[in-house]
Image: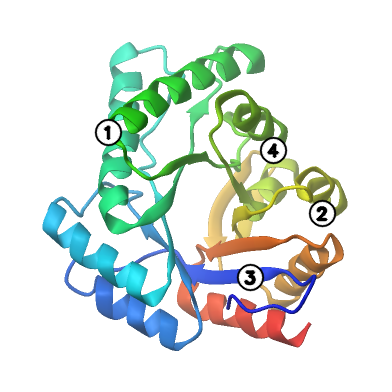
Amino acid sequence: MAKKGQGETIFHFGPAGIGGVKEAVNNLEVFKQHSLDACEVAFTYGVYIHNKEDAVRIGRAVKKLGMHLSIHAPYYINLASKDKKKIQESKERILDCCEIGHYLNAKYIVFHAAYYGDYSAEQCYNIVKNAILDMKKVIKKNKWQVTLAPETTGKKTQFGTLDELIKLAHDTGCFFCVDFAHLLAREGKIDYDAIFTKLKTLPYIHAHFSGIEYTDKGEKRHVITDAGKLAELLKFIRKYKIKEITIINESPDPFSDSIKALKIAEKL
């Protein structure tokens, strides 16, 4: 859904998950047939597209269909680990996504950046910042057409508040992914006015939204997305006249929930 009237938001909706190598192109075609023009490749448990030719083939379909493709990097990332080997392995996992993402015609490489551990928030920020700058050098050297997008996280033990990521984008030139469900789980409440006041000047927002279960420690698991909560989010996006936004759904049924979001947006 990329059409709009003058002054209206351009929405892109789609699921997390492109399927396996063999069915990826067919899945993208099905998404497009249902007016979904976004998708996030779930490399969350490992980069499973290894062959450059496969990536190029899928990337051609992405371009032909006009899909807005992104990648979620593996969960096994901690750029602020006390173990330097783990930091290097984390960078390698992200950069593997960047390389294959270039051939897939994926724009944003989304990842959970770090855990605070024994570091202060400021110390962790500086460590992550330096890691982002290091990876950006590799991306530039290889001429990969991708953008790093650390994500707002759902637990207080994780680096990734909205303010941290806005500052990180300013200081490094990276982008970021706003996961609204994670912000809710992290704080136990969500203040859309405060959030969109900070985001309203951006020409584009890359976002996640799903149902979520959480405790006082934060995120527990994703659940089916409530239509009423979807409508609430979309109304605030309209209220703040956000220019363009991609919303990826990560619920147990991301395809159906993305269609649900599309239908709600069309009714608003």
Residue 16 versus residue 157 in the image, above or below: below
Marks 2 & 4, CB-CB < 8 Å contact: no
Q: CA distance from mark 4 to mark 3?
A: 21 Å
Q: Is residue 63 left or right of residue 80?
A: left
Secondary element at tag 4:
helix
Q: Is residue 242 left or right of residue 215?
A: right
Give the label on residue 181, or none: none
Between discs 3 and 1, the one toward the N terminus: 3
Between discs 4 and 3, the one toward the N terminus: 3
Q: CA distance from mark 1 to mark 4?
A: 29 Å
Camera-nearest label, 2 or 1 = 1
Q: Position of residue 1 (x, y in %)?
A: 58, 78
Q: CA distance from mark 3 to mark 2?
A: 18 Å
Camera-nearest label, 3 or 1 = 1
- Amino acid at the residue labelled 3: Phe
Between discs 1 and 4, the one toward the N terminus: 1
Depth check, front residue: 125 or 3: 3
* Picture quadrant of residue 265: bottom right
Residue under label 1:
142
Q: CA distance from mark 2 to mark 4?
A: 12 Å
